[in-house]
Structures are given as structure tokens and as C-alpha cells.
Amino acid sequence: MSNLNNTVAVITGGASGIGKSLSIALAEAGASVAIADVNLSEASQLATSLGHRARAYQCDVTERTQVENLAQKVIRDFGKINHVYANAGVAIAGSILSTAPAEFDWLLDVNVRGVFSTIQVFVPLLIKAAEENETAHFVITGSENSLGVPKTGPCSAYTMTKHASLALADTLRRDLADTGVKVSIFCPGVVDTKLYDARRTRQERYGGESAMPQEYAERASAATAQGQNPSITAALCLTGVLNGEFLIITDPKIRDFSNKRSAEVINALNSVDTRLANWVNK
């Protein structure tokens, strides 16, 4: 990963979970790292541990002005931006019918609108970097939920937002095809993080911070503890980024349910071929 030397990476949601592991991996690979997080204290602690090439920034991606301010500060402090990881994300469990409207808004604003704002603010800076023959790469953190409906759950509203992240990445790839800016989406499976406890940093307008019931916290913690180590997830992600891959999958278990989606698409296409042929021949 030595070709990350002299590059600058921005990671939203970079102070915990997968984002924290990405921040560490990028710094170890030689990049300067801008760690952006809604929790400035955690971001500052991590930046301090990583040394002089890392800086911490407070950023709530649901606030467009904060994303804009983040970009300005990173350019001020580092002079350029080469990699952007739109990683900030939240999750809740439950079916569509059981999801409260305020929590649906929260998931949509962080996981979809937050990525949209990050794209619109940072991609022009990446285009400029590409024009100057610098590395320029935009990476969206998707999920196994981007590729189908996992057997675990339900976490239906979250799954919807991660399907949307794949659409954002794929259309962004098309939109930037002639700019020199590369686009990737990486889709981890279950990872040993505290994503299940995302309500601990929930903004007031979405219901405020909330501790989850002890029984649920214990079950969720036990389930995620069986997941992939986030440092492995981050390393696999960076390997895919450096290889220029668009779709980066970090857990082979995703095959178990993504194959079902692929088969359904193929079967539906075969069905329409047959139906149209029959219709033409009538």
C-alpha cells in the first residue's frame, strides 16, 4: 500500500467501527488522514494516537454546511484531497411497519442524504486533483444489505438505505467516467462493531440519544462479536481500492443471499424473453 504516500484521505464516521479501522489502515499505509465524525472527542483521541499526519474534525453529515466546512478545513490544513470515504452510517433493527417516521428520516438523512452531500461537496475537489494528475477516488461504505436481503434481521429501513448507496455509487461511476475520478463501493458483511448501538449519537431532531435495552444490547453484541474483525474489513477495502475495483466485497458469506437476488434477475429476464416471443408469435 506504499502508493498511498503523499495522499490525503477524508473519512466520515471515521472515529469508530469500520471508519476507525479505515483511518488506522490509511495512516499506516502512508496517507495523511482527516478523521471526521459527529463525535469530536473520539475523533481527536484517534487522531492523537495516529500522530502528526492525522487531524480530527467534527462533522454531522446530515448538516450540509458542516460537510462544506469540513472540505474547506481539510484543504486549509492539508492542501489537497485524494481519497474520500463516505462512511458515516447508522442502523436500527425492525420491519418497515415497526419503523417510526423520525427514525426512518434519521436513517435516510445519514445513510443517503449524507452520502449525497459528501459527493456534491467533495467530488469537485477530486476532479481538480485528477486534472492535476493526482490520485482521486471516492469510496462509499455500502453493506451486505446493498446486495440483497440478509437472512439476519429484519433491519428493513437500513437495508433500503444501503440499496440506495449502491445506486448512488453506480450512477456516480457513470457520471464521472471521463473525469479520472474512480468510484468504489465496499460491502462488508457482519463486522464486530457497535453499529447496532447507533442511537447513542442520534441527534435531537430524530429522537435524541437513547440507550438500548440491556437484553437487546447483549444479544446484538453477541451476534456482532461473531462478525469479521474491522481491521480485516478495512484492509480488504483498501486492497480493493488500490486495485481500482468498483464493487469490493469483504465477506464471502454474502454469497449465500446475493446469489438468490442474481438468480431472480436471471429468471425474470428469461421469463420476459419467453413471454415476448410467445406474444410476437401469436
Image (cartoon, helix red, strand yellow):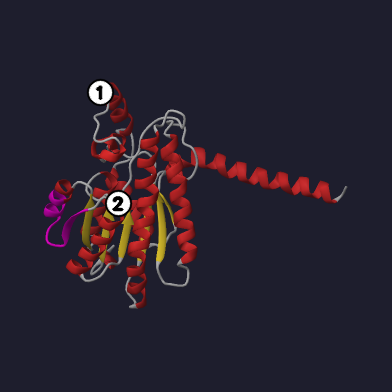
- The amino acid beneath tag 2 is Val
Image position, residue 245 (x, y; %): 43, 59
- The amino acid beneath tag 1 is Gln
The magenta stretch is 44-58
The residue under the point 30% across, 51% down is: 61
Secondary structure at badge 1 equals helix
Q: Is the N terminus in the top left, top right, bottom left or bottom right quadrant?
A: bottom left
Q: Nearer the viewer, residue 171 or 148?
A: 171
Q: Which residue is mark 2?
A: 61
* Residue 273 at least partly seen: yes
* Residue 239 at least partly seen: no
Secondary structure at badge 2 equals loop
The residue under the point 40% across, 49% down is: 112
- In the displayed structure, would residue 213 be above or below residue 276? above
Residue 214 tag number: 1
In magenta segment, residue 53: yes
